[in-house]
Image (cartoon, rainbow, N blue to C red):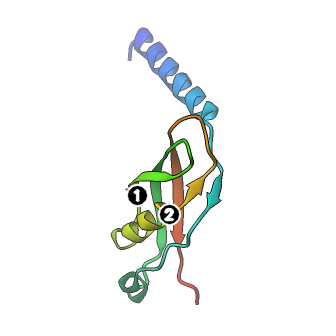
Amino acid sequence: MTRQRRRRWVRAVCLFASAVMAADVRKVTKTTQAPYPPFAMKMRVEGAVRLEAVVDPSGNVGEVKVVSGHPLLKAAAAESVKQWAFESAPGKTVEVVEIVFKIKN
């Protein structure tokens, strides 16, 4: 890697890090518990589902995108997050949410 390329890469990483650190996180004001999908429970599937929720200025969740998680758990997590509410803010934001599914013994 050339010196100039290395400098560009370091600058890009620094810009990304500063953008992440400056990002505002909106507080959740209302949540709903995601129902455990019956088939997933029968199969004893556990795990976390990570989602990105597009939140409008009034705090309502619009679009929800599943980033990662077990296929049997994704739909239940997404439907649950669509019912959440966040603090109001001047504009739309994308909030990263994680729903954890764990079978209680």
Q: Which residue does the numbered mark 2 point to in the structure image?
A: 83
Look at the numbered disc 2 and give the secondary structure of its residue: loop
- Image quarter (top left, top right, bottom left or bottom right) of the C terminus: bottom right
Q: For residue 102, what is the image quadrant? A: bottom right
Query: Against 84, is 42 above or below?
Result: below
Q: Gap between marks 2 and 1, in whole Å?
A: 19 Å
Of the 4 image quadrants, the one containing the N terminus is top left
Instruction: Specify which label sits upstream in the sequence, 2 or 1.
Output: 1
Image position, residue 32 (x, y; %): 56, 69
Residue at the (50%, 39%) spot, across then down? 92
- Dividing the picture into quarters, in which one does residue 20 lie? top right
Q: Is residue 40 left or right of residue 55?
A: left
Q: What kind of element bears circle 1?
A: strand
Residue under pointer 1: 68
Residue toward you, 32 or 69: 32
Q: Amino acid at mark 2?
A: Gln
Q: Residue furthest top?
A: 4
